[in-house]
Image: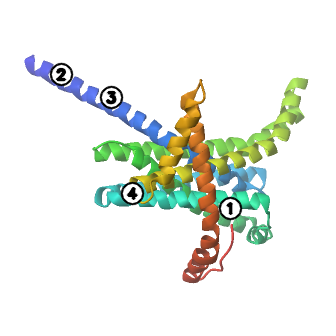
């Protein structure tokens, strides 16, 4: 009898440890997901363009294929690679984060420049002139998965840097949870956004009440504005997150602490001048100044990326250099 009670005590202890581990994983995953929110927003904003121009019945299958590729990127390639890097060469994590942050600044700045000085994307036009829809779909899915790989790498690296646990397995499980959750959230939202105009058309055509039909028409009219807003929010998030990552990395590596210290001081001064919501004001000022820094850095990187790195990659790969 005493042996059975001891066994039950051991089982209860194991259950408590398991429950605590689940709580730790959930808390760490939530924290990591929040840190990567800016990149997630951009991921959701970028993806709908890959189904533009296709028949409505191909939109969800294309999104499903991209989502599967995204899950493969995160769980099969990035998760083991980042865990190995964190174990054997942890000092490389911050420089990698900074490199990814600089890329986000470049992407965000290029979108801002394009908004003020729009130019035709001849490569995209050439793609859509193809006579083979199946070939076009394959190219678009492959291109989306490649773009997702860059964003997924940034998300997973941010998540890994956020996880504070000495346990390798807790890190691995948390990182996997973050990857799965973010992929489902992003591509679930993308599917909803892409099909919302079809839902609106159906409601406008078949609604049984005038209010239902009006709501359907409202959805159809609202979708272009929603897409434009999502694109703007995604660009702002890229500049904010990218700038923040680079600034924090410069401070942590002791390369240049002035931007971090200046922004931190400015946010505190502004917050002290406001009698309410000082925490929010501190965050808002910090995010805005991080975004300004990200925009300036991105603009400086555009000539380097387009005139040096792009042609160099094209020469190595044997493919012609193209703009975004």
Tag 3 residue: 19
Q: Residues within 10 Å of mark 4 (few under 14, many from 20)?
A: few
Q: Is residue 137 above or below residue 224?
A: below
- The label nearer to you, 3 versus 4, is 4
Q: Is residue 315 above or below residue 289?
A: below
Q: Secondary structure at mark 1?
A: helix
Q: Residues within 10 Å of mark 1 (few under 14, many from 20)?
A: some
Tag 4 residue: 253
Callout 1 touching callout 2 (CB < 8 Å) = no
Dividing the picture into quadrants, the one containing residue 3 is top left
Q: Is residue 275 above or below residue 314?
A: above
Residue 186 appears in the rendering: no
Tag 2 residue: 9
- The label nearer to you, 4 versus 2, is 4
Answer left or right for 282 relative to 250.
Answer: right
Q: Secondary structure at mark 3?
A: helix
Q: CA distance from mark 4 to mark 2?
A: 48 Å
Q: Secondary structure at mark 2?
A: helix
- The label nearer to you, 1 versus 2, is 1
N-term-proximal mark, 3 vs 1: 3
Q: Is residue 121 above or below residue 173?
A: below
Please name the residue shown 48% across and 53% down the image: 258
| Residue furthest top as drawn | 1
Query: Residue 302 or 281: which is nearer the viewer?
Result: 281
């Amino acid at each position: 009898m005493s042996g059975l009670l001891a066994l039950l005590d051991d089982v209860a202890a194991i259950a408590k440890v398991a429950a605590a581990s689940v709580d730790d994983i959930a808390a760490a995953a939530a924290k990591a997901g929040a840190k990567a929110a800016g990149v997630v927003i951009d991921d959701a904003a970028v993806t709908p363009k890959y189904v533009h121009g296709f028949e409505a019945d191909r939109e969800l299958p294309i999104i499903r294929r991209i989502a599967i590729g995204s899950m493969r990127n995160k769980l099969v390639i990035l998760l083991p690679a980042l865990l190995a890097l964190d174990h054997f060469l942890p000092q490389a994590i911050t420089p990698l984060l900074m490199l990814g942050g600089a890329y986000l600044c470049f992407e965000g700045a290029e979108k801002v420049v394009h908004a003020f000085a729009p130019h035709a994307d001849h490569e995209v036009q050439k793609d859509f002139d193809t006579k083979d829809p199946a070939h076009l779909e394959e190219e678009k899915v492959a291109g989306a998965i490649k773009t997702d790989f860059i964003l997924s790498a940034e998300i997973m690296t941010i998540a890994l840097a956020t996880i504070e646990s000495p346990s390798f397995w807790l890190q691995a499980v948390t990182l996997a949870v973050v990857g799965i959750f973010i992929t489902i959230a992003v591509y679930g939202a993308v599917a909803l956004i892409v099909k919302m105009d079809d839902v609106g058309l159906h409601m406008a055509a078949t609604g049984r009440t005038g209010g239902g039909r009006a709501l359907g028409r409202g959805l159809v009219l609202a979708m272009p504005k929603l897409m434009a807003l999502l694109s703007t929010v995604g660009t702002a998030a890229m500049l904010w997150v990218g700038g923040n990552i680079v600034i924090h990395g410069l401070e942590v590596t002791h390369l240049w602490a002035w931007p971090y210290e200046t922004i931190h001081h400015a946010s505190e001064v502004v917050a002290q001048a406001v009698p309410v919501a000082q925490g929010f004001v501190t965050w808002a000022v910090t995010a805005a100044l991080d975004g300004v820094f990200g925009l300036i850095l991105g603009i400086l990187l555009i000539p380097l990326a387009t005139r040096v790195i792009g042609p160099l990659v094209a020469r190595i790969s044997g493919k012609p250099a193209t703009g975004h």
